[in-house]
Structures are given as structure tokens and as C-alpha cells.
Image (spheres, helix red, strand yellow):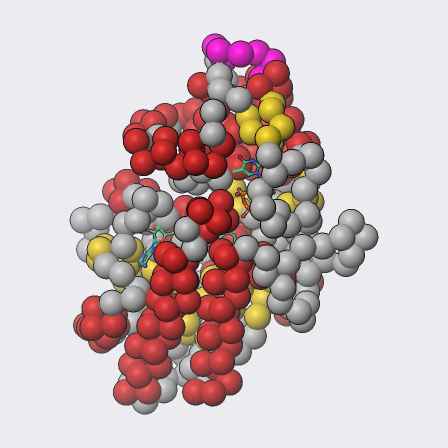
Amino acid sequence: MSNLSTKQSQNILITGGAGFIGSNFVHHWCNNYSSDRVIVLDALTYAGNRQNLGNLEGQENFKFVEGNIGDRPLIDKLLKAENIDTVAHFAAESHVDRSILGPDAFIQTNVIGTFTLLESFRHYWHDQGKPENYRFLHVSTDEVYGSLEPDDPAFTETTPYAPNSPYSASKAGSDHLARAYYHTYNVPTIITNCSNNYGPYHFPEKLIPLMCINILLGKPLPVYGDGQNIRDWLYVGDHCSALETVIKRGKPGETYNIGGNNEVKNIDLVTMLCDLMDELAPNLPIKPAKQLITFVKDRPGHDRRYAIDATKIKTELGWTPQETVEGGLRKTIQWYLDNQDWWQPLLSQEYQEYYQKVYGN
Ligand code: NAD
Ligand code: TYD
């Protein structure tokens, strides 16, 4: 049981709850607040997977609704019928490389979908008499702040927005809408901007699962450019506890940066993964796995460095991450080793076509 569990029972709508972070958050919430009612709304795009929700389906306090955040009549009905007091909004198109190949879906879901959700919530909250305990948590990314030079200070909540990919631009647009709904209509929105996550249920296209799976299959490990790009890695469980803290203690109208204070160069991360896989995985096809590292053509507009200054959430709300990079990577690798039945079906025809487009042969 969480030590933040003093607040009364809630009816929480979790959008994108069948995706990577969303499903980890659903499990986190159900474990900590078993008397709350949890409704997941997810369109089940290529990144959504009902299996991520495990045995929750069928439980009394849990409901899964397949649907789109852009479907206004559906959202209007759902908020009312389920008497929702908290929205945790994860649903998004989330992969930079896909946003380069086809930005349309990113604008539709991240900008217009978020707008539709905000509009519906605004009217619903108003009709309920603007209750003070209602919250709309908008889950966003540090990528909206753009790219840092090696000696720049880490992103704070007041760093100007400078998105460089269609993904980060669409997330920036949705952040601005969430902010404006607080300032214009007093809708109790809160925004979080988090660094790169990793952990269980991470779709294979992202760096860490992609490398783990390719090592197991003996395939090349494609490192973009010179491999010197830096990301600030956070274990997904730590992100979930930060979001819980923000829902329980955060102030409407505020933004909170969330990060692990774990800046690592891509090449160092991939090397660390190879070494851990050599140690943890039995019978690798190629060992040492490092031999598979292959530098490939850089991603267009590739941000050089991200780093989060998480002082505000630490000092104002008392949250700090618990996991080290090595500890989190060990857990993650073990999860991928133990759950091959989860990821193998995801390497579908559609995924192979995507892979071909991004990496060629
Ligand atoms: P994901 O791609 O794994 O999951 C997204 C989920 O949203 C999927 O289940 C998908 O089916 C669903 N979805 C997509 N479009 C939808 C729509 N129109 N209507 C309803 N559902 C829809 O993404 P993730 O990595 O879990 O990211 C979740 C959120 O966290 C995103 O908003 C992302 O921007 C943010 N974020 C991600 C990271 C990261 O490292 N992954 C870091 C910071 C912030
Ligand atoms: P990714 O997991 O796509 O997250 P993001 O682009 O949102 O930070 O990528 C993390 C880093 O790893 C990023 O600098 C791009 C790099 N990368 C590679 O070098 N090779 C790959 O195949 C992928 C998917 C990412």
C-alpha cells in the first residue's frame, strides 16, 4: 500500500492504458488503490496490447473500453457514466522514427485527440459544479524542450519549448493546450514532462527492447550516428510513482519535470546491455554480444542530449527515483528473457515492414 493513499476513493480514467507506460501505471494504481475504480480507454493501435493488463480484466473495479480519444461522444458518455474524477492521459503516438515516416497520426492523436479530451472534460467538470478534487493529468515528455549542448544545464520547468521532431512538436502542442485550459477555464490540469523510460511491456521498436531482442536473435544492433547522443533514463516504475505523487499532491496549473538523473551516452548504454545480456541470457547466438554493434545512418533531426532537473518535484512533492540504471536494466532484461511469448508476436509483418523502412537491410 502506498503512503500517499490517504485521499478518498477515486474513479480514474486512464487513456493509453494498454501501452507501455500506461499499462505499468494501471498495475501500479490497482496495486496501491484497490478500492478505486479504474477505466482504461485505448484505441489498441499497433502499440496497444490488452495482454499488458494481464488478469485485471474481469475484476470488479476494472473496465477496459476500446475507443479513440478523438471520439467526443464516446468520451462525453464515459466521463459521465463512470463518474470520473481523475483523468490520467497517456494515449499518444510515441515513437520519433514513426513520426518522421508519417506525422499525420501524431497530429491527429496527440494534438486533436488531446484537444477533444480536454474539451469533453471541461464541459463535464463544469456540469458537475467544478469540483475541487478533480484532476486532469497530462503525461508528456522532456523532448518538448529540444536538444542540449554538452555543458548546458538540465531542463527545468521554465526552459523554453524547442521541439525538433514531429513527435515532440505534437506533444508540445498538446502541452500548450493543457496549460491554456487551466489559465482560460480553470480546468484543473497538471502537466508532467518526463525523460526516457524503460522497463516491462516496452514495445520492441524503442532502443532498449530493440537491442535486447536483437541480441537474443543474433541480429545487428543499429546505433544511430556516432552513438554519442545522451538520454536521461528512468525506470518506468519510478515514473509511475512520480505520476501518483503528482495526482495526489500536485497543484493544478503546474508543470513537474520527472527524471532519473541518469545521463548515459547511447553507445555506453548499448554496451552495458550487451555485457548484461552476456551474463544473464543463456545460449546467445553471438557472444560477446558487443560484436553485433553496428553504427548506422543518423536519425534526421536527432536531438543530441536530454537531461532533466527534477528539483521541483523533489522539493515540493517529496518524490525521488529509487532505481539505479544497472538495477533497472537487470530487471528489464530478465523480464524480456522471461516473457518471450509477449514480444515474439509483436515482431509481425507490419513491424518487419516498419523495420525495413527505418533500417533498410
Ligand atoms: P506507447 O506508444 O507504448 O502507448 C500508447 C498507447 O496509446 C497505446 O496503447 C495506444 O494503443 C494508445 N493510443 C494511441 N492513439 C490512441 C488514440 N487516438 N486513442 C486512444 N488510445 C490511443 O506509449 P508510451 O511509451 O507508453 O507513452 C505514454 C505517454 O507517455 C505518451 O503520451 C508519451 O508521449 C509519454 N512519454 C513517454 C516516454 C517514454 O520514454 N516512452 C517518456 C516521457 C513521456
Ligand atoms: P528511442 O528509444 O527511440 O527514444 P527517443 O528517441 O524518444 O529518445 O531512442 C533512444 C535513443 O537511442 C535516441 O538517441 C535514438 C537512439 N536509437 C538508436 O541509436 N538506434 C535505434 O535503433 C533506436 C530505436 C534508437
Residue ID at (49%, 32%): 359
262 vs 354, left or right, is right
Closer-to-camera residue (131/95): 95
Count of residue discs = 0
Ligand 2 position by quadrant: top right
Residue 288 belongs to magenta span: yes
Q: Which residues are magenta?
A: 283-289
Q: Position of residue 58 (x, y in %)?
A: 18, 49
Q: What is the quadrant of the N terminus in the image?
A: bottom left
Residue ID at (66%, 69%): 160
Closer-to-camera residue (320/271): 271
Q: Position of residue 118 (x, y in %)?
A: 37, 75
Overall secondary structure of the magenta section: loop
Quarter of image, res 138: bottom left
Quarter of image, res 193: bottom right
Can residue 30 be seen here? The reply is no
**In this rendering, is residue 146 above or below 188?**
above
Residue ID at (37%, 84%): 131
Residue ID at (53%, 58%): 168
Closer-to-camera residue (278/218): 218
155 vs 99, left or right, is right
Q: Position of residue 9 (x, y in %)?
A: 34, 68
